[in-house]
Image: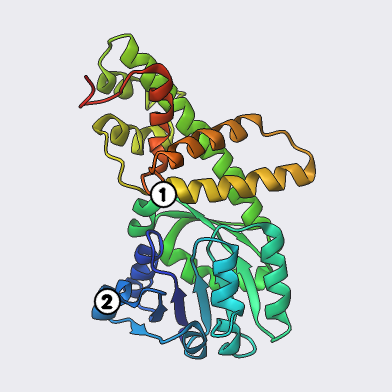
Amino acid sequence: MAERIGFIGLGIMGQGMARNLLRAGFELTVWNRTASRADELVAEGAQLAASPAELAAQSDIIISCVSDVPDVEQVLLGDQGAIHGAQPGALVIDMSTISPQATRSIGAKLAEQGVKLLDAPVSGGSEGAARGTLSIMVGGDTADVERARPVFEAMGKAITHIGGLGDGQTAKLCNQILVVGTTLAVSEAFLFAQANGIDLHKMLAAVEHGAAGSWTLSNRGPQMLARDWRPGFTIDLQQKDLKLVLKAADEVGVPVMFTAMISNMYRSLQARGLGLEGNHALIKALEALAQIEVGEQAA
């Protein structure tokens, strides 16, 4: 019998991920704090639960994809949390980005009720969520990972079992260090090109398939040039993840100087009220320093 899936959290990422589960033929129940965000999925065949607990009671595998540790704890362990509806033997997959330590703590509490947990944060932005091409970094027991593999395959293309519970989150924090570092490098290159008066589109075409090529350059670079700040991932969420990186790095004594600097640059953008713009708007912090604006609408 096919596993029944419950999906909690229908934000920028969750909408596309849940839709791909429907398209793959899974029986799907959804819940979101703002219920209207489920309307399209319900029209496409999903069932809407009144609470995470009700969702869990109707599901064999329960997926959460929410913003931060308090949100995960609320939807999984709170008064109406999934723990109160999940049956022994149920599997919870948390696809949020939270700290490894919080993941292990939540896993221990679920285990007391006979419920297993995988941490499976993702990378690939809203585009990857919509297309089903996410990179999924998984922590937990091998048997649970294999049980969940058909579910992961409906949402992603690169599914990697990193190690034990919480290790997926550590890999995701590594991913975030790389993402913001690359975003800063792309921003600097574009600003340098703009200041030197060369065609930015030709520069992008020249470098993106060489050694400097990256997902960020090819996907966010054109958005920067078009001054299109629609988010695949918001500045506010990026900052939340960087706080996790900085705390985790401090705990193990690893210097992450450039990541800390980039976090401060994002903080300056938040102070300007730009927290809901895409994380590629990092370039605006450099533009403010150089008094140069990059892209198609630049003066």
Please tell me which residue is depicted at 30% across the width and 22% down the height of the picture. 293
Q: CA distance from mark 1 to mark 2?
A: 22 Å
Badge count: 2
Examine the rendered structure and indicate whether residue 148 appears above or below residue 111: above
Q: Position of residue 188 (x, y in %)?
A: 44, 22
Sequence order check, earlier mark of 1 and 2: 2
- Left or right: residue 153 versus residue 81 is left
Element at label 2: helix
Q: Position of residue 35 (x, y in %)?
A: 34, 77
Secondary structure, mark 1, is loop
Quadrant of image for the C terminus? top left
53, above or below 177, in the image: below
> Which corner quadrant of the image does residue 83 belong to?
bottom right
User: x%, y% of residue 133?
Assistant: 40, 54
To which residue does mark 1 refer?
Answer: 233
* Residue 117 visible in the snapshot: yes
Taking the spot 69% from the left edge, 72% from the top edge, the residue there is 107
Mark 1 and mark 2 in contact? Answer it, CB < 8 Å.
no
Is residue 163 in view? no
Say which amino acid is labelled 2.
Answer: Asp
Residue 42, image quadrant: bottom left
Q: Quadrant of residue 14?
A: bottom left
| Residue 157 vertical placement versus 210 (above, below) | below
**Location of mark 2 (residue):** 39
Disc assigned to residue 288: none
Name the residue type under label 1: Phe
**Crowd rating for badge 2 (residues with CA inside 10 Å; few <14, some 14–19, many 20+):** few
